Amino acid sequence: MSLDNETGLDPPGIRVRPVPGLVAADYFGPGYFVWAVLIENLAHIGYEGKNMHMTSYDWRLSFQNTEVRDQSLSRLKSKIELMVRTNGHKVVVVPHSMGVLYFLHFIKWVEAPTPMGGGGGPHWCHNHIKAVMNIGPAFLGVPKALSGIFSAEAKDIAFARAMAPYVLDSDILGLQTLGHIMRVSRTWDSIMSLLPKGGETIWGDLDWSPEEGYCCNSLKDCSKAYVNQQSGSGNSSNGKLDATRNEKVHYGRIISFGKLSSQLPSSILERPDSKVVLFGLNSPTGRNSSCGGEVWTEYHEMSKESIRAVAEGKAYTSGNIVDLLRFVAPRLMRRADSQFSHGIADDLDHPTYNHYRYWSNPLETKLPNAPEMEMYCLYGVGIPTERSYVYKDSPSDKCSIPFKIDSGASGGGGCLKGGVYLVDGDESVPVLSAGFMCAKGWRGKNRFNPEGMPTHVREYRHLPPTNLLEGRGMQSGAHVDIMGNVALIEDIMRVAAGATGRDIGGDRIYSQILQFSERINLPL
């Protein structure tokens, strides 16, 4: 599954390709549906092979490289044109997760002139697409992509690593599971599309974040905290400080070394300039050369002083995480910097933004000239979702990854569990990333949406299955299980049958996405 570490394409002598057709992603394995439930329901209202198509692509590659190697974007363009021509209707596109970013890249590529783009012209989307119904959209990235690159971990992996350390990264057993995961995944350029976008403007800085004041406890406890705040009481019924209200969570510190570094006010957080520390100390002398090629990661090319410098940075925000990754994953970043961008455009009309590296970032590109096309953000809420991390040094085994999530760190008014600060989301994508563009970034005519394309936010409150007969649940809001959510399927079916966003009720919001969005000072 690895790609070439220099080109990001096939290694010599190895070719792995995506399976085509509806069977590409109907089931992940026996009994574990992905798109199958939606496909079956669409079949009930007349959809079949000639008017329903599954686009599979190699999700390891950068989006533009799927065109370079496989002509995937050209094939998708031809397929949509054929469907519109033979069926007489514009298409409804239903991307999920990273597929959302892939299709965002496509709608810029298809209208851009050749050879970089598809040459469809400025009205291609208007003539061919009725609606884009984005499921679990990671428009602004996901913090867990950062932890995956940094330490091959996320919340569940960190827990397993703490419970069974000799299974995942043991020199004694020689398994080095996380080392293998890191070595393979750092050859996949597509992971960089999922890094948080928009810097501190979107994700917050050392002292501020849009989710400030979010209550992580149960609805009952949150209501109690709100009542205490209204009454001016600073204490809970047991006489202790009400943590749900008074312990401020610094979500903007996406990576902190030590729980204290995640909590101290920035004014007393002794923190050197990250660029000076990182790039002033990088040494070519590696830690150890005896790990063997199969588990070798870029950490083994770093000196002990360089690794120590990373931890001395104390806290990293979305404003300097790309610098951090350039330091610890230079090969990946050399490739990725030519394929993706994670900033905010000052002038979207500047020729710089005609390049494909900006096309999957909604903050560095415009929606197409298609005022009748509709853009939906469909996602689950009500599940604790990863937002930022507390790290610590890993035991200095000669071949281990030197950092790991501190699974013993908890607190933060219930928001910090197992070294991970949590917010509302679908377990993978925070609501900020899933909902901001439809709730504010693209709402109405603005510089990101110059034609005023209608946008709709449709949230699905997570309810776990009530019994074993429900399987993974008919009202799940989880990132993948939502594909079997009855309300989601109904919304998609109605739009596929001709309804508009207004017909299905417009916005349906349960989370605090509107409040979070209003706190973001993004010029529109």
Image (tube, helix red, strand yellow):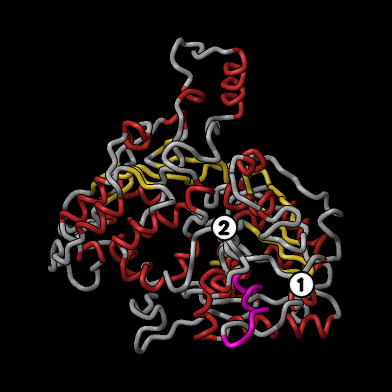
Give the residue number, with chain letter if any, for mark 1. Answer: 129
Q: CA distance from mark 1 to mark 2?
A: 21 Å
User: Toward the viewer: 476 or 181?
Assistant: 181
Residue 469 visible = no
Q: Is residue 108 magenta?
A: yes
* Residue 24: x %, y % from top left: 59, 75
Q: Amino acid at mark 2?
A: Ala
From the viewer's side, name the closer residue of 342 and 69.
Answer: 342
Q: Earlier in the sequence, mark 1 or mark 2?
A: 1
Q: Amino acid at mark 1?
A: Ile
Q: Quadrant of the N terminus?
A: bottom left
Query: Left or right of 396: which side holds 452?
Result: right
Residue 138's mark? 2
Q: Secondary structure at mark 2?
A: loop
Q: Quick check: 153 left or right of 343?
A: left
Magenta stretch: give its range: 104-115
Q: Position of residue 478 (x, y in %)?
A: 59, 50
Kindly indicate the quadrant of the structure image that contains residue 123. bottom right
Instruction: Please give left or right for residue 65 compared with residue 397 in the image.
Output: right
Can residue 334 be seen by looking at this rendering?
yes
Identify which residue is drawn at 57% across, 59% down: 346
Q: Quadrant of residue 33?
A: bottom right
With respect to residue 312, does 52 lie above or below?
below
